[in-house]
């Protein structure tokens, strides 16, 4: 029973990020490669501060992870299950 509740909590947290259009866009941009904030800005109309805030929150939630390369920080989706969800959404909505 506790396992089901834990899984439901995790799924709910993941889906909360998919319900925000800006967070969903960020996750889609990170779907197949790591990007830094500047690269994410060039793909979207989201401000630098908003992207940074979303990434910080998603990192705390375990949705994305980061790696520092000199002065730049690169982000990627941290869980293959999230990548599978994004891939499924792309397949469904590209029809």
Image: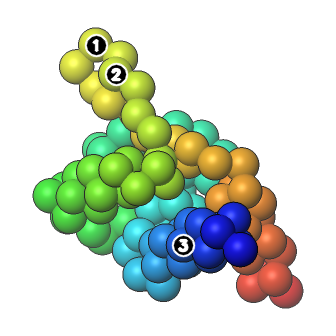
Please say if 58 is above or below 65. below
Please tell me which of labels 1 and 3 falls first in the chain: 3
Label 3 residue SS: helix
**Is 63 or 36 nearer to us in this picture?**
63
Residue shown at 20% from the left, 64% from the top: 50
Tell me the crowding category of disc 2: few under 14, some 14 to 19, or many 20 or more residues within 10 angstroms, Cα based: few
Residue shown at 30% from the left, 45% from the top: 37
**Is 73 or 80 nearer to us in this picture?**
80
Q: Residue furthest front?
A: 1
Q: Can you identify the residue that label 1 sits on?
A: 70
Residue shown at 62% from the left, 74% from the top: 5
Contact, mark 2 vs mark 1 (Cβ under 8 Å):
yes
Residue 71 visible in rendering: yes
Please say if 48 is above or below 73. below
* Percent of width and height locating residue 42: 35, 54
Residue 84 figure quarter: bottom right
Q: Can you identify the residue that label 2 sits on?
A: 68
Residue shown at 52% from the left, 42% from the top: 76
Q: Can you identify the residue that label 3 sits on?
A: 9
């Amino acid at each position: 029973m506790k396992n089901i509740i834990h899984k439901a909590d995790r799924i709910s947290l993941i889906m909360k990020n998919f319900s925000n259009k800006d967070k969903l866009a960020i996750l889609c941009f990170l779907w197949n490669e790591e990007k830094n904030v500047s690269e994410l800005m060039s793909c979207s109309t989201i401000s630098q501060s908003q992207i940074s805030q979303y990434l910080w929150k998603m990192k705390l939630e375990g949705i994305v992870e980061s790696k520092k390369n000199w002065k730049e920080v690169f982000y990627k989706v941290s869980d293959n299950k999230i990548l599978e969800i994004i891939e499924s959404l792309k397949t469904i909505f590209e029809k």
